[in-house]
Amino acid sequence: MAATFDQYPPCRALTMIARDFHARGWMAGTAGNLSARVTNGDTGSFWITASGQPKGQLDEDDLLRVAVQDDTIVESPTPGHRPSAETSIHRVIYQIFPQARAVFHTHTVEACLAAEKAHPGAETLRLPPLEMIKGFDLWEQDPRVDLPVFDNQLDVGKVAQQIKERFTQAAPRIPALLIHAHGVTVWGTSLQQTYHHTELMEFILRYMSLRNDTVT
Amino acid sequence: MAATFDQYPPCRALTMIARDFHARGWMAGTAGNLSARVTNGDTGSFWITASGQPKGQLDEDDLLRVAVQDDTIVESPTPGHRPSAETSIHRVIYQIFPQARAVFHTHTVEACLAAEKAHPGAETLRLPPLEMIKGFDLWEQDPRVDLPVFDNQLDVGKVAQQIKERFTQAAPRIPALLIHAHGVTVWGTSLQQTYHHTELMEFILRYMSLRNDTVT
Amino acid sequence: MAATFDQYPPCRALTMIARDFHARGWMAGTAGNLSARVTNGDTGSFWITASGQPKGQLDEDDLLRVAVQDDTIVESPTPGHRPSAETSIHRVIYQIFPQARAVFHTHTVEACLAAEKAHPGAETLRLPPLEMIKGFDLWEQDPRVDLPVFDNQLDVGKVAQQIKERFTQAAPRIPALLIHAHGVTVWGTSLQQTYHHTELMEFILRYMSLRNDTVT
Amino acid sequence: MAATFDQYPPCRALTMIARDFHARGWMAGTAGNLSARVTNGDTGSFWITASGQPKGQLDEDDLLRVAVQDDTIVESPTPGHRPSAETSIHRVIYQIFPQARAVFHTHTVEACLAAEKAHPGAETLRLPPLEMIKGFDLWEQDPRVDLPVFDNQLDVGKVAQQIKERFTQAAPRIPALLIHAHGVTVWGTSLQQTYHHTELMEFILRYMSLRNDTVT
């Protein structure tokens, strides 16, 4: 039976996924970040990739454990490591969605190009009704799905705050959000599902980036 | 001499091909499905990938054996596994074409883009006269080949029924069909040939997706 | 020191290169063919890939040795194997260019798209003055290089005959030719150099296929 | 903890990186060149890839050690090897930037296409304000970064001289330069950082090459 990423210790699974995504060009340089909520023991914390580490060479001690409720660093195996600069975005996802077990942020050319299909100032981007949408458990004929879109800001905390405000009002239909000029963030109820969600969303964004027209 | 996929037990061959196609981005998430007709023993059945399993991590017990004539599950090595949601499409191919030994369905951005080159409502898409067409044993100067195209429907059984109706009237010139916003399905007289047919068809669809004009 | 392909027995080198090019998508299905002139012993013969064998699974006994001067099969390790359908093209290259040690034919979407940049009926395609051109030992500022272009014909012998006629009159500036809707063929004075020529030519053709304008 | 390329002997690291970049298609044939300044011992010298060696098969004795101040070859493990034809460009980078520890030159289709977005005769190309820019330690909202652009010349020494003149007057905001029809050159304070800079710059150039408009 297919061995899922959830069968590995979370830090082991995250390094496997980081190397996989780096090899695809989805985490160039030190870009992108991955996290997994602790499910045994201190469930009020999550593991997240350290800032500035090369995703294609990541090791298990390149992750830190941080609190879900505030910015406490709970466990840091490697002296000097700091949590990813985008930890605050992961944190709000875990706060708002209790079922979220993992959050992955990839960083692709295709996501940047697809984001430009949104109308200027629009808060969402209409996704095309591809069969792939069903991978998000939306079993509808010609599903109408709007992907939340956020402006990229130097202060990541502001982006996290906007995500919190919008998602507290209404959860998106699919567990994903897009930041302009930056990339997509997805979540799921398991590491394996979040891995699939990343693949599905990158598929959809690549499709959108290759179409000549504006999709929204 | 080149070891073909037909020299392996069918479930072993299908997991090898699933991992290969996943690595190319042709089976993102749990998308796509592969099957092989039983040739020793119960030839009235075929092995097909289980629903919802990750194609890049597939194991041999992630396949089920189902009947060709009806929707009986003959053998299911892993409790809880269900056959692919698109088993009905595989089944009609095996019913209509007695020589079909394997059916592969991949799911690519390029196939979705190429399908849009068909005229709205058209039942076929004219393929360009590439040398690659000869890989389908069509030895003609500038071959005129029309690929059958079907609408994507939430009820896969309806798609299967339409395939059955159209193919019973007239078989397509090449063993392949395209579903809008979804992907291509190919078949062949061996696992190895079906593997080639997938590569050839994805080549042709990628060519079509990259051309600026409408090909049909 | 870098181990070149010429340090291996030729059939070993050709299977390594076939698997390499297949993995890049340059020899989909059973497309493409590779050959190497014998340099020890019977120099009037060359090894060439058998017809219809999968390039990603090729073994050393999937090559046959054929004569340079006529269509004699000199040595055939595997019963039933026939030489590539395009052996006649390889043969004329070896006949016309005594220094040609290897001939590689790849089959890419990019080559098909780039060929369409040629004016209708034109016998050549002007290459862009990229730095890559220097890889063919053309050390010029803004080199003007015309790649010979041939129509694709069902009868490969006719293509081979046209190549012979044109190249006997005048050798192309670089060791390469393009066939419409089919792909590029390159040669070189060693297996290693021919491998480089393939990479360079595919680089140039990909560049041309991605530009929006007509280059010729 | 992630093993960086700086933990290996420099020639070992450079062969690893050469094989990595070749596999991505960034060093086709024998294109591209990599160097690393000596940090233990003779700090007035640097190791650089030999001319004409295949980057996908590079070995540690395919590098030569040359002087930073003049064109002396200090150490040449393999008889007959000459330093890369573009050694003079590496040398001026090491001369002007004392902190530069490594210089990598890749050679991609995307870099050639992006360079054409520059206005004719322009000395710079405005980069888009992508999040990726932060990988160069530029923490600004919508950073305005101009990438220096140079004409490709047959005489590499002339290009090196122009780089020296322009960079002596004013260093670019990010450690990178682009040569038309040729490719990008980046540098960094470590092998690992230079590896990241290559990935970041190729990301940005690919984004630019895929956009339809002129960016500058």
Image: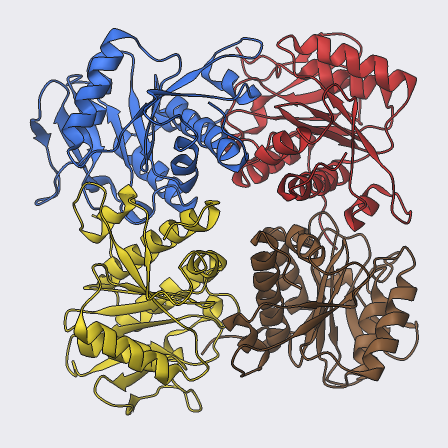
Chain colours: A brown, B yellow, C blue, D red
> Does residue C161 lie above or below D113 as drawn?
above
Q: Is any atom of residue A134 visible in this view?
A: yes
Q: Along the line of sight, which residue is nearer the eye, A80 or B15?
A: B15
Where is residue C105? Give x, y as percent.
31, 32
Residue at point 55%, 71% (across, down) = A129
Is residue C100 toward the left or the right of residue D195 in the image? Answer: left
Asked if residue B139 lies left or right of residue C15, the reply is left
**Picture quarter containing residue C68?**
top left
The quarter of the rendered structure image containing the C terminus of chain D is top right
Residue C65 on image: x %, y % = 15, 30
Residue displayed at 56% across by 23% down: D62
Residue A193 image point, x, y percent: 60, 76
Q: Quadrant of residue C161?
A: top left
Question: For this view, does C202 lie left or right of residue B39?
Answer: right
User: x and y percent of residue D169 in the render?
Assistant: 91, 17
Q: Which residue is at the front of the view, A95 or C177?
A: C177
Q: Nearer the viewer, residue C31 or A140?
A: A140
If the image is split into quadrants, where does the N terminus of chain D sit? bottom right
- Residue B8: image quadrant is bottom left
Residue nearer the viewer, D79 or B202: B202
Q: Is residue B47 visible?
A: no
Which residue sits at x=61%, y=69%?
Answer: A195
